[in-house]
Amino acid sequence: MKPLTFTLRSEPEERLDLSGLIPDRLGGMPVVEIAGLSIGTSRSPAIVGDIFKITGTDAANIVFAGGSGRFDFVGAEMKTGHIRVDGDVGARAGRRMAGGTLVIEGKAGLQAGSGLKNGRIEINGDAGEGVGGPMAGEIHGMTGGLIIVRGKAGHRSGERMRRGIIALLKGCGDYAGLNMVAGTIVVAGRVGHYPGHLMKRGSLLFDRRPADLSPTFLDCGRVDIAFQALFDRYLMEEKILDRPLLGAKPTRLGGDNAVLGKGEIMFPRG
Amino acid sequence: MQELIRNGIVIDDTFAEAFGMRATAIIITAPTLKWARQAAITMTGFATSVIGCGCEAAIDIDIPASETPDGRPGCRVMIFAMSTDELQKQLKTRLGQCVLTSPGSACFASLKGSASLDLGSSLRYFGDGWQISKKFGGRHYWRVPVMDGEFLCEAKTGLTKDAVGGGNFLLLAADAEKALAAAERAVAAIEKVPGAIMPFPGGIVRSGSKVGGKYKGMMASTNDAYAPTLRGVVKSALGPEINAVLEIVIDGENNDAVNAAMRAGLKAVIDFGPKRGALRISAGNYGGKLGKFHYHLKDLMP
């Protein structure tokens, strides 16, 4: 079966809420019915048929041929299946996703993977602010799953995250892991100001010493432990990185001692 | 009793009788194989028989660094017990006292089974609040700070109810030296079989037992029929040419593992020949009514 493909006719004139176009909801739905789903957000909202040409039948495998910064909530609340976007997406891609895989070939907007529960989100371009973070008023950001950003990520990545892994492979903005509760953030590349600010627990694993740290992170020296080898191996097996991130005996900083202080920042020596 | 002869060694037409058990397996790693094995040997000490030790345990195989979860040399340890509760108790205490304490050690699950047993989940409290939980790749680990760094331990391991305990064969030889030489050959061959362990000292038992005894409260007592010094005064199973008997006892992850181990051990003894090793091979059973698994020697010949 060919993937259920939504080919973009032209740049949409309004922001689109694509949370309805997930395998869980489209399985078994006739094409006519899919084409009639409302996805616009304006006073007279657009329907799927206005924006996309629909081909293919395999709803477990959805492809958006062509993307746009106006594609919001792509893959939101998805539980199973696979979605690929051949282009950019807008805000909150994979919001509260609970399973399956979401691959975005282009850029992602604000809060990609916000409140992610499980599953895998892979963004090949850059990602905006608040990757895996909470929406306003929420207590926690992501609580599980894996987000990989192969481009640059914005500020406050992994804010209030509780579990799961975020891998940012071309650096990130300021306050990575802000108020983090637990979980792991991996950053290869330049890290902005104050990573781990007010983190309680969790691990920030970098490929270099961060330039600008909160003074409440304390040096625990170079540690000879088995964990980093296990984790480096995981990163390579998952094809997140092609070489070890930390290597033997990384430096460990404990913090943030302005709060609970049971988190850590680790990076290779030097 | 009908006799079968292989390479000049008499094979009794009898069978080993074995029992269903619960088993689990873990991988212990360390900076060097020496220290991985040391943790494993310590953990599997005093674990020869469920009768007196609560469990039967030994190193299954060594695992090269390239195949362990953390890229350090390690070995796979198997533990067998009669009940899930006893297995959990033995695993927890042995892990806490012998592996957690061993320099540079880390511990990982090595069995997917019908149920799970706590590993790090019960030891994490040693961290006194500084323990770190990490979940990735579908697995859950605990990192517990200790004086040489961290004890890294997977949260849980698996339990199998398909395990078999008590596969065995007896090596009858002209003297103790030859019996031991044959037994050592068998042990070396069985050590290479994955999923099977030999819990007794160096894999070998010299004090085979029969059920019960003349003294009240003795569940088992010496197997006088196979004790050469009593050959003249009891109903002996030994002919005049036999002066020493040693037994190999095998526990396996499943029926196939015990089968493979028995086969490998018997082949090694037969290849070794009667001049330097065993003159006769037999096996221990209780008439076939107690144990579910029967391993007939004639079916396991090379």
Image (spheres, coloured by chain):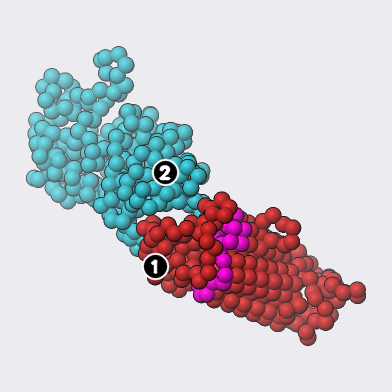
* Of B58 and A189, the residue lying toward us: A189
Which region shows up in magenta?
Answer: A178-201
Establish whether labels 1 and 2 are both on one chain.
Answer: no
Chain rendered cyan: B
Query: x and y percent of residue B129 in the render?
Result: 50, 44
Q: Please name the residue that numbered disc 1 is placed on.
A: A269
- What residue occupies the far bottom of the structure in this picture? A10
What residue is at 47 percent from the left and 58 percent from the top?
A: A218
Q: Quadrant of residue B294?
A: top left
Q: Position of residue A244 (x, y in %)?
A: 42, 69
> Which residue extends farthest right?
A44
- Residue A8 visible to an observer of this rendering: yes
Q: Residue B148's spot in the image, x, y percent? A: 35, 51
- Left or right of B79 on screen, residue B199: left
Give the colour in which the image draws chain A. Answer: red
Q: Amino acid at mark 1?
A: Arg
Q: Where is mark 2, residue-wise? A: B24
User: The residue tagged with tag 2: helix, strand or loop?
Assistant: strand
**Kind of residue sitting beneath label 2:** Thr
Mark 1 vs mark 2, CA separation in Å: 39 Å
On whether residue A189 falls in the magenta region, the answer is yes
Image quadrant in which you'd find residue B31: bottom left
Q: Secondary structure at mark 1?
A: loop
**Residue for point 46% across, 44% down:** B127
Judged by its main secondary structure, the magenta piece is: loop
The quadrant of the image that shows the N terminus of chain A is bottom right
Give the label on residue A113, or none.
Answer: none
Relative depth, front residue between B292 and B247 = B247
